[in-house]
Image (cartoon, helix red, strand yellow):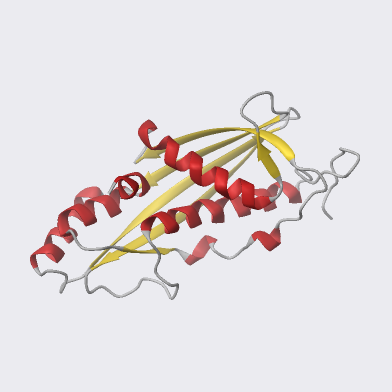
Amino acid sequence: MRTIRFIGAGLLALSLVACITPHAYVDPALHDATWTAIKPPAQKQGVGLDIELFRNGERLARADKTLRASLERALARSGVVVVQPGGAPATLTAKFDNIADISAAMKKGFGTGLTFGAKGSSVTDAYAITFVYDDGSGPIEKHYEHALHTTIGNAPAPTSAAPMSPAQAFDQVVEDALIHFLRDLQAEGKLVIGRDGRARFVG
């Protein structure tokens, strides 16, 4: 339950009350791009990684470790940057705000629990995501919105996507947002580095 606690407030409330295995689905709205949208540079850019996780606008520092691990895995897959703990030439800041109606999720979960899953429930954990990249030439800030849907009991799937574990779904939310951000940065000429160490603009 530790992983679920850090992934989404709505998911946590639903699962705690109903005590039935949840199924998680990534919203398709931001799931329209893959790593093929990113142009691999000849040289990776070293970045320092700063992260902050919020829940309904309130700081949730105890969950930073989970978000950082997910982001570091996604960044490693990107082939564009390498995280450097200190002395990096650029900084990547990520802010995730998990937005969910906890009380509504608990009510749904209670009803599902009473029927032992016959009456299914679903909740949505929305994520307001902000990335800031700064290589010394001025920060570039981008905002994205994503969501993770969770069902328990006899509830219809909210999307046509295959269900995942909550942890897998959260990783996908992080990866989807990062792909869009890196693609947007490259469209502005960032993180496209030639063999001579100079930035190359994407045209």
Residue depicted at 30% across the width and 47% down the height:
9
- Residue 13 x, y percent position in the rendering: 22, 51
Q: In the image, is 123 to the left or to the right of 88? A: left
- Nearer the observer, 190 or 36: 36
Reply above or below: 134 against 149: above
Say whether residue 202 is left or right of residue 106. Answer: right
Q: Considering depth in this image, is 16 or 137 the residue closer to the camera?
A: 16
In the rendering, at what x and y percent does residue 112 appear? 15, 65
Image quadrant containing the C terminus: bottom right
Q: What is the residue that sits farthest to the right in this orientation? A: 196
Describe residue 159's horizontal placement relative to residue 105 as left or right: right
Outermost residue, top side: 87
- Left or right position of 10 against 189: left
Q: Quadrant of residue 85?
A: top right
Residue 41 location (% of width, % of height): 79, 49
Quick check: can you spot residue 59? Answer: no
Above or below, 175 relative to 156:
above
Rendering coords of residue 120 (x, y %) = 21, 70
